[in-house]
Amino acid sequence: ISQQLCSLTFGAEEFLLFGTDEQGKKFLEPIFTGDAVMGFAITEPDAGSDTLAASTTAVKEGNEWVLNGSKVMIGNGTRGTFMLIFALTDPDAARSKRHSIIIVETDREGYKADPMHGKMGLRASDTAAIYLNNVRVPEENLLGTRGNGFHQLMAFFDRSRAYVSAHGVGLAQGALNMAVKHVRERKQFGKPIGSFQGVQFKIADMAVKIELARNIMYKAAWLLDNGKADTNVTAMAKMYAARIAVEVVDEALQLHGGYGYFDDYDIERFYRAAKVLEIYEGAKEIEKMIIGRTIVGR
Ligand SMILES: Cc1cc2nc3c(=O)[nH]c(=O)nc-3n(C[C@H](O)[C@H](O)[C@H](O)COP(=O)(O)OP(=O)(O)OC[C@H]3O[C@@H](n4cnc5c(N)ncnc54)[C@H](O)[C@@H]3O)c2cc1C
């Protein structure tokens, strides 16, 4: 399930937005039927937040693309049927017009993926380093337009960041539910700890944060559904929902006391899962940068 969700939320949109009918049939349909798994490989050892620094190359030779380079922290890297590779195709063009997105089937010669171990959370998902060594794919594996990769990536982030905001809201709501259950059941000083005003104030603060995050998440989703994708609102939704997920999960664990520190309780897993929301699909500082630039200008 984790692999399928990763496929659907972290890449499938690129096909819907920029793919041809043939590409949709060949690559997207098997994703929806559960026969294929995909990932989107953007991050490199020296290109994280600065996506335009990506140096994996795709060079056109005859009617093929030849890819060389490496990617890190890629979802579905070892399990994927194919990957979308954000690659440098036009190094002499203006900085934002240098990259393109190429579909690479993982059974092509020269594709190698190594699992990355020791992840703090999201352990059901596969995260890998990818190595491309003279990997050849046909020219029709170009997704969208040559040199338009960065623009396509930004359109993708407008969507994937909205998904991450929903993830944050869901995670925070789940943590709050667990905390409420626990404080109703756990007795100290002769009564349920949930009856103490100090505890109820914490619950109230958590609920308000979640309500606000849910509202901005819905706004971002509504704008997307109605063809009015708004990069700024989506950045706000992602940044805020991720932040409150971290805060709410922290407070929910606190209310579990020492028991929350053990993995018998799901809150321990939620605590580990929340942090990444402030890192991937744009670190929280990158969201802030987008919001600040939109308001103030460059
Ligand atoms: C579990 C997991 C799954 C992932 N899955 C994928 C995937 O499927 N595909 C993929 O391509 N990538 C994936 N990533 C990578 C993720 O997108 C990057 O980690 C993220 O973009 C940040 O890049 P970086 O780690 O290189 O951090 P860096 O870019 O090195 O940034 C480190 C920190 O520096 C600060 N910083 C950086 N730039 C600025 C700035 N301009 N202003 C202010 N502060 C700044 C921020 O605090 C930032 O967190 C995944 C990561 C994780 C942890």
Image (spheres, rainbow, N blue to C red):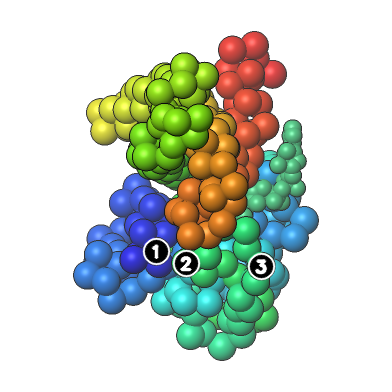
Which residue is rendered at x = 42% and y = 76% of the image? 81
Instruction: Name the residue beneath numbered marker 1.
Output: 2
* Residue 7, x across and y down, in percent: 39, 62
Judge whether 185 appears above or below 34 on screen: above
Which residue is rendered at x = 63% and y = 63% of the image? 119
Q: CA distance from mark 1 to mark 2?
A: 6 Å
Q: Earlier in the sequence, mark 1 or mark 3?
A: 1
Judge whether 130 appears above or below 88 on screen: below
Badge 2, how many Cα within 10 Å: few under 14, some, many 20+? few
Which residue is rendered at x = 65% and y = 14% of the image? 297
Which amino acid is tagged 2? Ala
Task: Determine contact: label 1, label 3, CB under 8 Å.
Answer: no
Q: Is residue 175 left or right of residue 249?
A: left
Q: Quadrant of the C terminus?
A: top right
Q: CA distance from mark 1 to mark 3?
A: 18 Å
Which amino acid is tagged 3? Gly
> Mark 3: is the Cβ under 8 angstroms from ligand 1?
no
Name of the residue lying farthest toward the front: 190
Which amino acid is tagged 1? Ser
Badge 1, how many Cα within 10 Å: few under 14, some, many 20+? some
Instruction: Name the residue beneath numbered marker 2.
Output: 124
Which circle marks residue 118 in the picture? 3
Which residue is rendered at x = 69% and y = 59% of the image? 44
Residue 273 makes an appearance in the image: no
Give whichever of 94, 46 is nearer the camera.
Answer: 46
* Residue 287, x across and y down, in percent: 59, 31
Task: Determine contact: label 1, label 2, CB under 8 Å.
Answer: yes
* Residue 100, x across and y down, in percent: 55, 55
Give whichever of 282, 257 is nearer the camera.
Answer: 257
Q: Earlier in the sequence, mark 3 or mark 2?
A: 3
